[in-house]
Amino acid sequence: MKINQVFIATQNQGKVKEFKAFFGEKGIEVKSLADVDETIDVVENGSTFEENAIIKAETIGKMIQHPVIADDSGLEVTALNGEPGIFSARYAGVGKDDAANNRKLLEKLDGVPVKQRGARFVCALAVYIPGKETQTIRGVCDGLIAYEPVGTNGFGYDPLFFLPSLNKTMAQLDRKEKNTVSHRANALKQLAKKWNEWFR
């Protein structure tokens, strides 16, 4: 099955660049929600990252009748039984406030020793192609939650997410480093392995 164009369910140009690099090698044009004339509001009411990604991809894909890739991502902390999980963006309340989310996370982990501060970033990708079954991929990045924010790059929980192998937080990495080790990068690596199998 020949696919010439795919829409990424985001207006985040950073994400779009990552997907353009991936699909450019395959000769596939990448567009985003910024290229869609109509406003699309999707209610992500799934109970897992995969469910939310599927809801987003299928809702948008059926509206515009084009292949769509959607992602849902967040942070899972072992000591907190997987919190904040799918509620990562709004952990501290309805508004998306990175600083407030980080403060709440540190408060919940107050007194927890470093060996018990294990966490992982998760990225679930859903791939919707009209007329085919929606497929999903999961990428993860393992690390620890630091005791205080360090670094100014990135967003969200990046300043608290420490990578022992690099001795840096995610927010201390430059774009090239992050695009090598991040959960989204790992999801794209998985997608590269599966793409031809699914859509050849």
Image: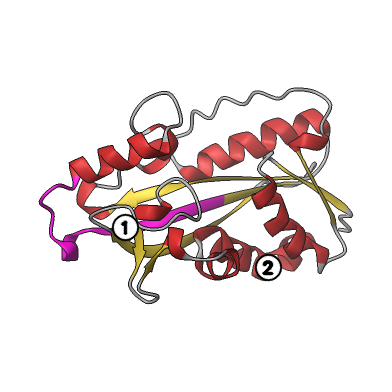
For the residue marked with disc 2, what is the amino acid?
Ala
Q: Nearer the viewer, residue 122 or 134?
A: 122
Furthest residue in direction bottom, as rendered: 165
Residue 190 painted magenta: no
Callout 1 crowding tier (Cα within 10 Å): few <14, some 14–19, many ≥20: many
Tell me where residue 155 appears, x and y as whole percent. Answer: 48, 48
Tell me where residue 63 appears, x and y as whole percent. Answer: 78, 28
Callout 2 crowding tier (Cα within 10 Å): few <14, some 14–19, many ≥20: some
Residue 119 painted magenta: yes
Side of 20 relative to 70 (left or right): right
Side of 122 relative to 27 (left or right): left
Tell me where the magenta segment starts and ends, as one range.
Answer: 109-124
Image quadrant where one finds the C terminus:
bottom right
Closer to viewer: mark 1 or mark 2: 1
Q: Residue at x 81, y 32 (%)?
A: 36
Side of 71 relative to 129 (left or right): left
Furthest residue in direction left, as rendered: 111
Image quadrant where one finds the N terminus:
bottom right
* Mark 1 vs 2, N-terminal side: 1
Q: Which residue is mark 2?
A: 192
Q: Is residue 64 visible?
A: yes
What mark, if any, has residue 119 been given in the picture? Answer: 1
Q: Nearer the viewer, residue 56 or 37?
A: 37
For the residue marked with disc 1, what is the amino acid?
Ala
Give the Cα separation between the discs numbered 1 and 2. Answer: 25 Å
Q: Is residue 200 visible?
A: no
Q: Nearer the viewer, residue 139 or 154?
A: 154
Q: Secondary structure at mark 1?
A: strand
